[in-house]
Image (cartoon, rainbow, N blue to C red):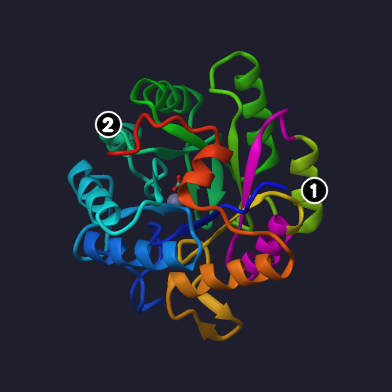
Amino acid sequence: MDKLIITAALTGAEVTRAQQPALPITPEEIGMAAAECAKAGASIVHVHARHPDGTPTQDKAVYQQIMTEVKRRCDVIVQISTGGAVGMTPRERLAPVFLKPEMATLSMGSVNFGQDVFLNLPEDIALFAAEMRAQGVKPELEIFDSGMLATAKRWLAKGQLPSPAHFDFVLGVPGGMAATPQALMYLLSELPAGGTWTVAGIGPAQLPMATMGIMLGGHVRVGFEDNIYYRKGELALSNAQLVARVARIAAELGRAVATPDEARGILGMTAVNTVA
Ligand code: KMH
Ligand code: ZN
């Protein structure tokens, strides 16, 4: 097995400070959280930008500040969100891709998202994919349901996405695929040749899915975007606390964590955008 890539999804677009007092919001807070997570074993940080009042934004300038604050503290791969928040326009969501981050998320379809719809029309997915290619950004294909993996495979076969692809199976969103071992095993049975994968379990599914990711040779995403608790009824103290637990479990299972450079190698990333 490759070394384990841990992604820390630090902030997201939906979680509030009222729900999780340690949620990093400002670029400086996100930079500090990224450095703590890097120390705990993360090699990728998945970031969303917020206005100072905590509301989500895809403002390029705020993402630039986040990238600067992260990069001056550590060498983790910065993966910006193109999902943004429900209701944002595709053009709005695309804005930070023009900063040439090393990685960005690319959702492969639409899904009910709680009481909302996270809308990703084929023409918008195509726009995002084309711009990521133009800017030298490695996409992480976000899979919320099995049809999205089928879509990704069709697009890969037609050369509309770069291969080999890296997937993030986001399981347990209300409206999406359940976070069960059976669901994950089905997705893995459909993984295209050469593909790499990460699993992100939502809420109480975060730890069991992370453990499966470690055991099955995949990679793991944890953090406040997906889960704010350490265990039932007990809020996590920080994103880094969640990362450290995964690194500990991985060590117990004999799987070392990847450094950022090792993660770049595992994901087949060129050095194009590493200085952004
Ligand atoms: N906030 C969700 C609606 C991503 O970052 O690319 C979408 C999301 C996915 O978080
Ligand atoms: Zn996200």
Residue 215 can be seen in this image: yes
Task: Please rate how many residues cluster around mark 1, counting C-alpha atoms within 10 Å: few if below 14, some from 14 to 19, many from 20.
Answer: few
Residue at position x 82%, y 53% from top?
Answer: 182
User: Mark 2 = which residue?
Assistant: 98
Task: Please rate how many residues cluster around mark 2, counting C-alpha atoms within 10 Å: few if below 14, some from 14 to 19, many from 20.
Answer: some
Let me know if residue 193 is in the magenta part.
Answer: yes
> What x and y, as percent, mark residue 264?
49, 40
Residue type for callout 2 = Phe
Tell me the distance, in whole angstroms, between the alpha carbons under discs 1 and 2. Answer: 35 Å
Q: Earlier in the sequence, mark 1 or mark 2?
A: 2
Residue at position x 68%, y 50% from top?
Answer: 177
Residue 179 can be seen in this image: no
Mark 2 within 8 Å of ligand 1, using the beta carbon:
no
Image quarter hosting the C terminus: top left
Residue range highlighted in magenta: 191-214
Question: Which of the 4 quarters of the picture holds residue 135?
Answer: top left
